[in-house]
Every structure is written in structure tokens, then in C-alpha cells.
Amino acid sequence: MLQCQGCHLEDGSGSPGSVPSFRDAVGRYLEVPGGRAFLVGVPGASTSPLDDAALAAVLNWIVEAFGPAEIAAEFAPFSAEEVARHRRPPLTDVDAVRAELLRRLDARGAAGQGAAAPAAWSPERVRSRPGSAKPSHSGGR
């Protein structure tokens, strides 16, 4: 959990403009192909010292705690085996993968197949930190 809190904060609120909020949003990734692998592969998760079972438990808790509630109530929990499949190598271009997943979420919403991507997670609003060319989500936290 400490790895996640470093960027997304204890309450999941993130940092507007640089780190997306988990609140009522993180579970949306489970609605599109590649979303589960994304949550496992972000550097803060994939490079954490947790074993695969413990990381699966943390990811399950994050979805359940931060929702949105309708997804948290019905999602298939992460397993240690799933985490092991998607953990290595960690994502190196988190912003590009996130942008593609958000595009898929928006397309689903436009097609009436589910909710669109939360505005707080739009690629335009989630950029590199000011003064940095690095992606906004680093693995060392």
C-alpha cells in the first residue's frame, strides 16, 4: 500500500494535474481489454516488494475501496497467477497506455456500453509533473 500512497495518497485522491485519483475511477479500467494488466503493470505495483498473492490482495482492496461501487461489487478479483502473468516487465510508458485505455473507455461510453472515462483521468489533465519530461507515475513510490 505504501507504494501506491506515495503518488495516489492515503485517501486515493492523487494530485490534480499529475497523478490521477483512484476515487470512483480505478475500477473503470476493469471494463476494457488491457485494463487489468495495466493496474498490475504500473511501476508502483509491479516493482513493489510484495509477492504476487499480496499484490493481488492490495489490488483487490484498491478496487473495492475506491470503486466505483457498481464495479467493486461485481468484479472478478485479481489472483496471484494473474499478477504473475502481468507483473514483468513493468510498464515503461504509463501515460501512453493510460491514454489508450481512456480512449477505449470513452468509446464504450459513446457506444452506450458503459461509463466513459472519468474526467479526472483524461490524458489532457494527467500529464508529466511540471518541469519534468518523465511520466507522472514513477515506480519508486
Image (cartoon, rainbow, N blue to C red):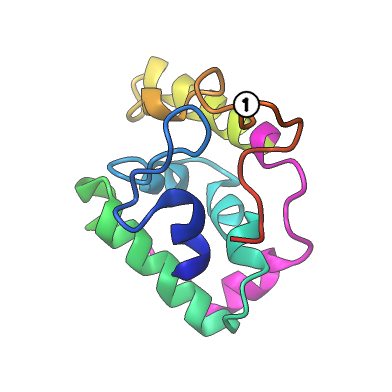
Q: Which residues are magenta?
A: 75-96
Q: Residue furthest front?
A: 131
* Residue 80 is at least partly visible in this image: yes
Which residue is at a point 46% across and 22% down the rendered structure image? 106
Residue 93 vertical placement versus 64 (above, below): above
| Side (left or right) of 95 relative to 69 | right
Residue 41 seen in render: no
Q: Quadrant of residue 132?
A: top right
Task: Return the x and y of residue 64 as percentages of the image width and height.
Answer: 28, 61
Question: Where does the image place residue 90, in percent across and percent down from the top left?
Answer: 73, 59
Residue at 39 percent across and 27 percent down: it is 120
- Residue at 22% across, 58% down: 73
Amino acid at the residue labelled 1:
Pro
Question: Where does residue 83 sit, x and y in percent of width and height?
Answer: 59, 71
Residue 36, percent from left and from top: 53, 54
Question: Crowding at label 1, few (<14), some or many (≥20) Cα neighbours within 10 Å?
Answer: few
Please state, as top left, top right, bottom left or bottom right, where the C terminus lies in the image: bottom right
- Which quarter of the figure has residue 25? top left
Residue 34 to residue 130: above or below: below
In the image, residue 118 above or below residue 64: above
For disc 1, the marked residue is 130
Instruction: Out of 121 and 87, give the one closest to the viewer.
Output: 121
